[in-house]
Amino acid sequence: MSIAPPRKISATALAGFAAVLLARALTLPRSLWEMDEVLFARAIEHFDPLSHRPHPPGYPLLVGLGKLFDLVFHDPFTSLVALSFVSSLVGYVALVAAFRRIAGEGSERVAVAGALLFHLSPVMLVQAPLPMSDPPALMFLSLALWAGAILAGGGPVASAIVLGACSSAAIGCRPQLALAVLPMLGVALWQAPGWRRRGEALAAFTLVSLLWFVPLVVATGGPRGFLDYELKQASYVAAHDARTSRQGCSPARLAKRFISHPWGRRVLAAPVLLLALAGAGRLAWLRRKAALPLAVLSLVQLAVCLTVMDPGDAVRYALPWVLAVAFAAAAGCEALARFARRPAAAWIPVVLILIGSLLSAAPVLEVRSTTLSPPVQAAQWVQRNLPPKAIILVEEDMAPHASYLLRNFDLAPVDEGLRRAAKRPKAAVYLLAEGESGWKGAVTFRWPRSDAYRRLTRNHYRVVSLSPITPGSRFQVVRGVYDWEPNIRRAKWRWMDADAAIRLLPRGTRAIAVTLGLDRSAPLPSNSVTVLVNGAPAATLEIARGTSRRLELPRPAAGGLMEIGFRSSRSFVPAGGSPKADTRRLAIQLLAVERIPG
């Protein structure tokens, strides 16, 4: 049962299909890259949302489709990339058909141009080949728009079924889209001819929703567990995406991230947005009611983005908005060409935009399709150069990559790993982290810096480092010792409270040397510190502001673990009453711990 009468495929549409196929085939990623890709790959192996396989809100239908592809490819990464590849091709065909219906008679050029402007936009060139949730979700959105346009024109029962089923499938692949897809579906049902068709669409929506919703509820521990799972995610979004991630970001900069950055540089984004404005005006003047579901989808999604979404991931969140902008821009090109009485000239700005899109995305596409990602390069270096008993300290951003790519190694969060390494002074200990490292002997893996990387990606995982942790830095924190500053990759000091202590194994040494300091920004002119070894006073140091003192502590004759305590006579709180300021109580800085061989 078809949802529309057969229609001859035009040479223009076929040429566009070939262009999308070629673009995707030549820009397939060579390896896993982003954190979300790793979480999705882990979910293909074992669907367990409570263990972030994948991360909230769960993506159940994406995982199900990925598992189907994995029956063929037997590799989660390859399976998800293949799913994205197929989704792009099907999505292009569906989008051409949808745009043709929306734009009206004689709209072949607008339909093909709009689908090309979207699928070959800078953001889609970068994001569409990835093993992520966006490509299949956008495919189902395109199919739903097509079916909705047919249904609005009095289409058969199949159009209602496809509208409901594909709207649900888009949410099942990417649940965040529910906030925009449900209003779109509501408008499409309002345009449907009669309650019977509306009921058929709602029945299809309900059935498909149950197919992906029930497994998600079961995997999260039943209705109560599912509710707790989603409420925790909602709290995180409210605290992080809607608040913390927006600090220091002005409304103008926020709008720019979501509205123009998906189109790359301003020299390309500005003409596209102006053409889209002209095209939207023409569609409104022609009273193309068929465009209403697409308009609602894109405007609601943009409003959600501007209100609660993380601007760091703006280009991906804005994809439904980009879809509508591409269609409106194609309509704008057509309107200008007709105004000039040269209809075929509509292709001139379209081709120029496509060339600009390719040039904008090229710096990311070239390196990603020819070179392993920095996280994968780092993992392969570990596998080639370190023994399995090596301790790998993993920063939080690198934890998914490490657990998936280095599952045979001894992995640990930084603090836990340092405590464990304190008892193994001869073990190889490395820090796996995102970003440049200041540790001596660090190995760095990087992709080139580019404006495209900054605009069209989350701007993460471009640089990954592996740093050998010196034996002197391996100690257990007993109490009162804060994190490394300015960060673990550039570990220069650790502030300590007035009563602090560390513990280490001095095996193979004759003494342990500690270097203490008082930062020149401290409000204290000096501080007196008593150093204790296994509870017994060993020395008292007076440290003036802006200076440091080094002290050698002989290894205790009894052997075993050595606990070094620090009792300072004075301390201060740097907060100053500010609600966002540092509220720790600080006394002295631990600058270095050295093992002196004996």
Image (cartoon, grey):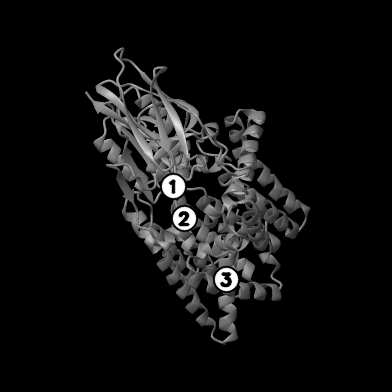
Name the outermost residue toward the bottom.
341
Note whether 438 is above or below 290 in the view shown: above
Residue 271 place in picture, x, y as percent: 53, 74
Nearest to N terminus: mark 1 or mark 3: 1
Distance between mark 1 and mark 3 Cα atoms: 29 Å
Query: Residue visible at 58% across and 66% down?
Result: 325
The image's mark for residue 457 is: 2
Q: Amino acid at mark 1?
A: Glu
Name the outermost residue toward the left.
598
Q: Amino acid at mark 3?
A: Leu
Residue 276 visible at all? yes
CB under 8 Å between discs 1 and 2 = yes
Note whether 531 is above or below 173 in the view shown: above
Tell me the crowding category of disc 3: few under 14, some 14 to 19, or many 20 or more residues within 10 angstroms, Cα based: many
Foreground residue among 332 and 360: 360
Q: Amino acid at mark 2?
A: Thr
Distance between mark 2 and mark 3 Cα atoms: 20 Å
Residue 366 place in picture, x, y as percent: 35, 59
Residue 17 place in picture, x, y as percent: 45, 64
Task: Tell whether 326 sits left or right of 467.
Answer: right
Closer to the camera: disc 2 or disc 3? Answer: 2
The residue beneath circle 3 is: 273
The image's mark for residue 564 is: none
Q: Secondary structure at mark 3?
A: helix
The residue beneath circle 1 is: 34
Foreground residue among 538 and 129: 538
Query: Residue visible at 49% across and 68% down?
Result: 13
